[in-house]
């Protein structure tokens, strides 16, 4: 049976790679609906190639412009309502959440309530409101299938294993663009330097998050929610080659790891084809060519964004949502040239410091804390 797919964020790094996976498996997958932000040229091409029934863009103006660009019969929606409709009001079986940031939270919850299987790339959603997303998924009997490479690796390592036999989960981290720099050397780094990731080609926000190591922090929280594992049993290991995507250690000290070349189409396709596997157009792993793999202890002093994320995860309640929102604004300010690289961590630190935590927040409280953190981060003067 052909699986119908909706993609939130179809013009981004994960979105376009998801469409590549679909293109290679036309008998298995069909595009039902797409949502993008502002990239009309690419969305128009995607409409032409994949013939979705519904699409959504960021604003009404953009929707009108898109209408003039396409000849295919397609419903063109816009704004948060349009995004919600693509998430929840289509015939899609699976929704790939690949927008960036906590703006994905509302549509993800709506897709879950509509009973859609979720292929979750948008980790900020789980960081902001992991308790609400996992509760909703359990209530509606919906699967949250990981797209993030580390979480896909963990998911594959846990296949068929007894949860009680898991001793710990080891998330690997490449170290990002600045892994070899000292803290002093980070003082004057530029946006261009930060955007050069050694192993992965990704969207701008997650590339900066990889350089600050906030990304690994978000991933620790993501793993906590996806695999209901406490923070004491979640470890991060520096592994510069990004060949081992993560590992699980069991009580008998057996370690199961998942390996592969860094290519997101593998975890994306696994999330779509689970529990089956299919060929991909990716390069097979050649360990002889790679020769050596390296591992190093993670230095939490060197990467305070990781340390703060783990502390935020442990604190729970509204704290991870505030961490996430402060980070999103800090990254946007860094990309816009209004703060330096090291002021990203300072922003998160100062906003977390000023926050009065809410325990077990409901959706409105999460959104209020997110909004407060954004405004506070935006108004910080350095
Ligand atoms: P990109 O920045 O490449 O893409 C973001 C997408 O979201 C674009 O399609 C953008 O549209 C769309 N978008 C932005 N605003 C809106 C809006 N208001 N309504 C609808 N769509 C919107 O990000 P990535 O693909 O890199 O990342 C997406 C998510 O996946 C993030 O949460 C990231 O952490 C996660 N992830 C990414 C990985 C990667 O390899 N890239 C790996 C693991 C996780 P447009 O461009 O048209 O404006
Ligand atoms: Mg990852």
Image (spheres, rainbow, N blue to C red):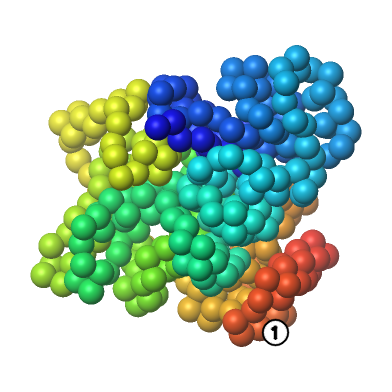
Task: Indicate whether 55 appears above or below 130.
Answer: above
Q: Quadrant of residue 28?
A: top left
Give the image location of residue 177, x and y in percent: 49, 44
Give the image location of residue 90, x and y in percent: 63, 41
Task: Indicate whether 87 appears above or below 371.
Answer: above
Front one among 308 and 18: 18
Front one among 182 and 353: 353
Q: Spot the residue most to the top.
A: 71
Q: Quadrant of residue 247?
A: bottom left
Residue found at x 57% / y 70%: 132
What secondary structure is found at the residue carrying circle 1? loop
| Left or right side of 69 for 183 | left
Q: Quadrant of residue 11?
A: top right
Residue found at x 30% / y 45%: 275
Give the image location of residue 367, x and y in percent: 72, 68
Residue found at x 63% / y 69%: 321
Task: Indicate whether 333 appears above or below 268.
Answer: below
Which residue position is annotated with label 1? 356
Give the image location of residue 109, x and y in percent: 61, 59
Q: Quadrant of the C terminus?
A: bottom right
């Amino acid at each position: 049976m052909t699986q119908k797919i909706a993609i939130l964020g179809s013009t981004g790094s994960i979105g376009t790679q998801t469409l590549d996976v679909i293109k290679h498996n036309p008998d298995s997958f069909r595009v039902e609906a797409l949502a993008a932000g502002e990239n009309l040229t690419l969305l128009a091409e995607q409409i032409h190639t994949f013939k979705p029934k519904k699409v959504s863009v960021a604003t009404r103006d953009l929707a009108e412009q898109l209408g003039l660009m396409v000849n295919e019969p397609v419903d063109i929606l816009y704004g948060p309502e349009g995004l919600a409709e693509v998430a929840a009001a289509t015939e899609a079986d699976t929704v790939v959440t690949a927008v960036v940031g906590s703006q994905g939270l509302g549509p993800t919850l709506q897709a879950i309530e509509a009973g859609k299987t979720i292929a979750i790339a948008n980790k900020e959603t789980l960081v902001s409101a992991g308790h609400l997303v996992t509760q909703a998924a359990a209530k509606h009997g919906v699967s949250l299938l990981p797209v993030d490479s580390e979480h896909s690796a963990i998911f594959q390592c846990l296949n068929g294993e007894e949860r009680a036999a898991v001793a710990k989960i080891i998330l690997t981290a490449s170290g990002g663009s600045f892994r070899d720099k000292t803290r002093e050397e980070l003082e004057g780094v530029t946006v261009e330097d930060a955007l050069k990731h050694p192993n992965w080609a990704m969207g701008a926000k997650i590339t900066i998050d990889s350089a600050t190591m906030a990304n690994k922090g978000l991933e620790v929280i993501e793993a906590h929610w996806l695999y209901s594992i406490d923070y004491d049993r979640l470890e991060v290991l520096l592994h510069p080659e990004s060949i081992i995507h993560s590992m699980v250690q069991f009580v008998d000290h057996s370690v199961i790891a998942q390996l592969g070349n860094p290519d997101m189409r593998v975890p994306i396709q696994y999330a779509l084809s689970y529990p089956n596997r299919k060929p991909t157009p990716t390069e097979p792993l050649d360990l002889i060519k790679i020769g050596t793999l390296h591992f190093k202890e993670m230095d939490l002093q060197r990467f305070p964004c990781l340390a703060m994320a783990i502390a935020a995860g442990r604190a729970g309640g509204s704290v991870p949502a505030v961490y996430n929102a402060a980070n999103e604004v800090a990254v946007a300010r860094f990309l816009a040239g209004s703060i330096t690289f090291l002021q990203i961590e300072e922003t998160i630190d100062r906003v977390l410091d000023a926050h009065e935590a809410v325990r077990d927040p409901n959706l409105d409280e999460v959104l209020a804390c997110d909004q407060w953190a954004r405004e506070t981060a935006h108004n910080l003067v350095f």
